Image (cartoon, grey):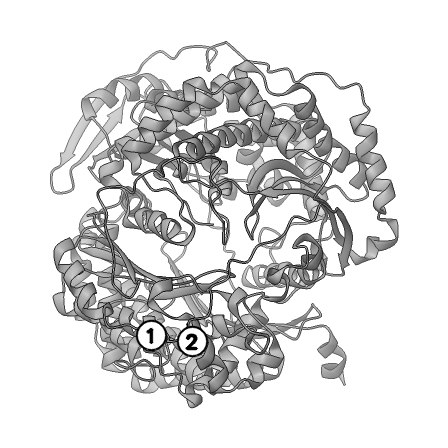
């Protein structure tokens, strides 16, 4: 789901997105009221043929531009003999156009540094088809070429019959990847919840009978009918000259013509019938028992000032309701694994009030009653004034933070806004106008406004009840009469109003006694200040201007779970999560959530195998609160047996049917084999949960955070070094130290040597998953790391060309490489893909053949050049992000490596030759240590045994 407004990126406000995004919304004005004007910073226009464009200059990131071709064309427009061809046509746009026949388009873009899949992409939904392309904007010829690509995508696809036949296999493999319990169950309940509308019979992936057999005239008919300028828009946002781009758009797109006999672009909807539905759907691969109640309504629009006020009310409503359901999870015996309720977008012009629950095994009645009870409590008594006040503050703080970041808004955010504006008419007035509207409207929103939403949305008509469960539980599931009885019983209960308990105590029990900064050094080249505090703790500060109001931080100290024996491992590995679920200082987890609502910060402890530490982020204003939380996680962690018992109970319930899911079983097998079946690497089990002890976890956590002298903290972002130093002295310099300086232990857990093959038989669908793993000792250094990346990309390029384009056997082959210096210098090189079971051996053989070619001849110079161009294109923008620098500095510190390695990255890339890649392939893909792991459907096990 795409984010629409700038301020929605803040997590406390995310629920409002659900109102805004509905495929094919018909905007319904409540009264005649002018629409909010489009942000004046975007240049927009419509050509004589109806083609629309939106252009905006934006320098985040610099020297980059995002281009999107948006079509009001999706699968709902397909004729009966075209089911799946809207999506198939999207594929064909990459397989031959007027100026880029066959696969020349991909080749052209890869040479320019644009990655297929990661950058070059597209999607097709019920109501829209969108092509996206981020490119460097400082290359005029490339910019001109990409506009030509966009013109070709608009209506210059060749639809070559040979390319169509080659692409059938790719599309069918994409469809195969989606098969499983969720897809099978969806096919059963879609007709009911979609009221047998057009959406029921136009799922974008389509029908096998069509995909396997259609001829060119059928897809050409769809193309000629619907790919036309009056249904298309080009969105260009980035570091560009707006006037120049507008001129080029007019030159390229003015010649597009609408068909002489246009078919009407019908706006399909899901009709409200006034009827209710009840469905029970089971599947043998379903792992949980879930229930959902959907109460459907016509969706409001978002075009006018009044609409904006309605959206604000719903955002507040959803946030307050989410907080209430979150509290239920922290009980000693939580009534469900998870539960929620909100107003969210549906499709076909509707939204809905959704109540959902994942029940504990055998406790569907208890779980469903619990989620419905909170809905009934809301309907009966509404929200409280303190809840509303807190939500308003959170909302205002969120949009104020967004306004502070307006000059650093990423181009993707603008693209999403203009896409929604074109497709659905959703308002896009700009962040300043949104901020003004919010300040005007929020104070006047009262309890009656938000409580009336409950009365409007929680009704007894247009209500669907859906129960999804494992097939083995089919006979124990309730029917419609029983479920309605449960709901009626809840509605008859003597409920009490919600009590909003608020803690007024300070966050930490005892204010710290500040330490001192003992020493300070400055790295002028990287603008890094290193401080050593009186307790031995080290702090690195890197001020940046990449964001206006963001500080991110991370810390580490050696040790981790490696210091504990296998008997204590489960408690050790769970310790940080257990503590985080209990709260800190004077606040339990519910009180802490309320205390933090409206603040822009996040603080989280962690314990891994080799390290422990605390990660987080903060706005400038909330930095001291974040520091207080760091101090509290060190000195005042909480351990509540009731919360712990509830956490374990929910975890057990979530694992009960894990073995039903083929992907989970295969994932656990891969992990176990790669970890040589060490218990620390095998998958989660009920038995492992039994080994987690609260007191032991609490003790281990305290031990891991007892010695501040062993910790290094790194802060990156909107830092004023003079302002932050007193906070560091007060909250970090005061942390306790033992000066033990523990180190992690090398447990020697890694993939086994030799050649290993394992087949897992699980699942009923005719699909397979393949993992080919090369692993072993590694010579870790910057030069080898770059060459290994070149090897990875060179192989991925060839597998995409051969397995997908030439053999039509896979949808998206992938290659991954991981390299570690500590505790041992080792690597894992993994090739993975999904495919038809009958093609497994053939595709593995093709993969090994490509690997042998790399070992024998090395890659083509052109493929090395593509890797280099792609890597440079993706690397340069990263250097302007806080996240990159935080991760990079921590890695260099942990590996005891110089910071200046980043300065040599370009020269290392430029020095890589095909012969270097061949040498790396010969050394690290020798096959001496080779693991083949394959997931096959269960029905083949008997055949293979025979």
Instruction: Identify the residue at horizontal 59%, vertical 20% (top origin).
Output: 383
Q: Between residue 922 and residue 813, name the one nearer to us.
A: 813
Q: Which mark is residue 228?
A: none
Q: Which residue is mark 1?
A: 155
Q: Residue 760's quadrant in the figure?
A: bottom right
In the foreground, 168 or 882: 168
Q: Do the CB atoms of the residues marked 2 and 1 lie less than 8 Å apart?
A: yes
Q: Marks 2/1: CA distance?
A: 8 Å
| Res. 254 in view | yes
Name the image quarter holding residue 524.
top left
- Residue 770 visible to an observer of this rendering: no
Residue 261: image location, x then y, percent: 41, 75
Tell which residue pokes out farthest to the bottom in this image.
162
Task: Tell me: residue 605, above or below residue 794.
Answer: above
Residue density around tag 2, few if under 14, some if 14–19, many if 20 or more, within 10 Å:
many
x, y (%) of residue 55?
A: 23, 53
Q: Is residue 943 left or right of residue 109?
A: right
Against 614, residue 122 (above or below) is below
Badge 2 element: helix
The quadrant of the image that shows the C terminus is bottom right
Q: How many residues crowd mark 1 within 10 Å: few (<14), some (14–19), many (20+)?
A: many
Instruction: Tell whether 246 sits left or right of 621.
Output: left
Q: Which residue is mark 2?
A: 223
Q: Secondary structure at mark 1?
A: helix
Q: Position of residue 308 (x, y in %)?
A: 42, 33
Residue 50: x, y in percent?
31, 62
- Number of numbered labels in the structure image: 2
Query: Which of the two discs, 2 and 1, labels the residue nearer the N terminus?
Result: 1
């Amino acid at each position: 789901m795409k984010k629409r407004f700038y301020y929605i990126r803040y997590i406390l406000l995310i629920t409002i997105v659900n109102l805004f995004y509905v495929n094919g919304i018909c905007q319904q004005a409540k009264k005649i009221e002018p629409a909010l004007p489009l942000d004046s910073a975007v240049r927009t226009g419509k050509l004589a043929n109806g083609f629309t464009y939106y252009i905006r200059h934006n320098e985040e990131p610099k020297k980059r531009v995002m281009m999107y071709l948006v079509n009001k064309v999706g699968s709902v427009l397909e004729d009966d003999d075209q089911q799946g061809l809207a999506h198939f046509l999207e594929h064909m746009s990459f397989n031959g156009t007027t100026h880029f026949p066959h696969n020349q388009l991909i080749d052209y873009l890869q040479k320019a540094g644009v990655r297929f899949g990661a950058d070059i992409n597209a999607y097709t939904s019920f109501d829209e088809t969108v092509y996206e392309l981020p490119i460097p904007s400082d290359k005029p010829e490339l910019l001109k070429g990409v506009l030509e690509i966009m013109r070709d995508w608009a209506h210059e696809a060749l639809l070559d019959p040979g390319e169509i036949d080659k692409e059938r296999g790719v599309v069918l493999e994409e469809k195969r990847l989606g098969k499983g319990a969720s897809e099978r169950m969806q096919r059963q309940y879609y007709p009911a919840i979609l009221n047998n509308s057009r959406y029921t019979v136009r799922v974008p992936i389509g029908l096998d009978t069509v995909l396997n057999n259609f001829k060119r005239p059928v897809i050409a008919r769809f193309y000629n009918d619907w790919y036309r300028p009056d249904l298309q828009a080009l969105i260009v946002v980035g570091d560009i000259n707006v006037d120049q781009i507008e001129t080029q758009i007019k030159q390229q797109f003015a010649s597009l013509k609408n068909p002489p006999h246009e078919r009407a672009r019908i706006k399909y909807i899901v009709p409200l019938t006034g009827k209710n539905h009840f469905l029970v759907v089971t599947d043998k691969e379903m792992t949980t028992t879930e229930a959902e109640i959907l109460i459907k309504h016509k969706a409001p629009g978002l075009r006018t000032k009044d609409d904006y006020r309605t959206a604000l009310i719903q955002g507040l409503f959803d946030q307050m309701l989410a907080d209430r359901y979150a509290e239920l999870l922290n009980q000693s015996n939580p009534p469900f694994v998870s539960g929620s309720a909100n107003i969210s977008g549906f499709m076909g012009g509707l939204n809905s009030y959704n109540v959902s629950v994942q029940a504990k095994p055998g406790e569907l009645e208890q779980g469903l009653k619990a989620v419905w009870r909170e809905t009934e409590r809301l309907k009966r008594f509404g929200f409280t004034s303190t809840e509303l006040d807190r939500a308003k503050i959170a909302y205002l703080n969120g949009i104020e933070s967004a306004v502070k970041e307006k000059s650093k808004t990423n181009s993707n955010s603008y693209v999403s806004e203009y896409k929604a504006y074109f497709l659905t008419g959703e308002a896009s007035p700009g962040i300043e106008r949104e901020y003004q509207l919010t300040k005007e409207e929020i104070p006047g929103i009262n309890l009656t406004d938000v409580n009336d939403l409950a009365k409007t949305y929680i009704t007894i008509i247009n209500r669907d009840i859906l129960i999804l469960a494992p097939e083995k539980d089919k006979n124990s599931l309730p029917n419609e009469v029983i479920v309605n009885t449960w709901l009626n019983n809840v509605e008859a209960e003597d409920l009490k109003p919600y009590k909003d308990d608020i803690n007024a105590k300070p966050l930490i029990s005892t204010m710290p006694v500040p330490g001192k900064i003992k020493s300070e050094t400055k790295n002028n080249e990287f603008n890094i200040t290193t401080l050593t505090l009186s307790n031995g703790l080290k702090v690195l500060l890197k001020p940046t201007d990449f964001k206006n109001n963001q500080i991110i931080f991370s810390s580490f100290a050696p040790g981790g779970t490696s210091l504990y024996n296998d008997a204590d491992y489960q408690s050790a590995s769970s310790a940080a999560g257990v503590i985080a679920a209990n709260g800190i200082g004077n606040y339990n987890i519910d009180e802490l959530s309320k205390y933090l609502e409206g603040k822009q910060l996040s603080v989280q402890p962690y314990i891994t195998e080799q390290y422990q530490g605390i990660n987080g982020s903060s706005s400038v204003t909330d930095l001291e609160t974040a520091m207080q939380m760091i101090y509290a996680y060190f000195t005042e962690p909480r351990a509540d047996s009731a919360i712990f018992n509830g956490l374990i109970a929910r975890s057990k319930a979530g694992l009960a049917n894990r073995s039903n899911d083929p992907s989970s079983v295969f994932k656990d097998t891969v992990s176990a084999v790669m970890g040589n079946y060490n218990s620390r690497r095998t998958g989660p089990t009920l038995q492992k949960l039994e080994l987690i002890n609260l007191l032991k976890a609490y003790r281990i956590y305290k031990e891991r955070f007892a010695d501040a002298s062993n910790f290094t903290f790194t802060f990156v972002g909107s830092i004023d070094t003079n302002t932050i130093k007193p906070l560091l002295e007060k909250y970090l310099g005061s942390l306790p130290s033992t000066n033990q300086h523990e180190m992690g232990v090398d447990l020697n857990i890694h993939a086994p040597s030799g050649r290993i093959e394992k087949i897992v038989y699980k699942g009923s669908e005719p699909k397979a998953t393949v993992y080919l793993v090369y692993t072993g000792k590694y010579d870790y250094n910057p030069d080898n790391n770059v060459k290994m990346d070149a090897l990875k990309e060179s192989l991925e390029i060839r597998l995409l060309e051969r397995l997908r384009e030439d053999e039509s056997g896979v949808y998206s082959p992938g290659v991954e490489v991981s390299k570690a210096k500590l505790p041992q210098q080792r690597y894992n090189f993994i090739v993975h893909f999904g495919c038809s079971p009958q093609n497994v051996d053939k595709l593995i053989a093709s993969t090994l053949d490509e690997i042998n070619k790399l070992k024998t001849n090395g890659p083509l110079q052109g493929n090395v050049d593509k890797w280099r161009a792609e890597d440079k294109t993706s690397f340069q923008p990263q250097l302007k992000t806080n996240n990159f620098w935080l991760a990079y500095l921590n890695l260099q510190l942990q590996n005891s490596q110089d910071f200046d390695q980043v300065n040599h990255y370009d020269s290392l890339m430029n020095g890589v030759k095909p012969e270097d890649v061949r040498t790396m392939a010969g050394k690290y893909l020798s096959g001496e240590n080779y693991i083949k792991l394959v997931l096959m459907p269960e029905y083949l096990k008997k055949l293979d045994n025979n």
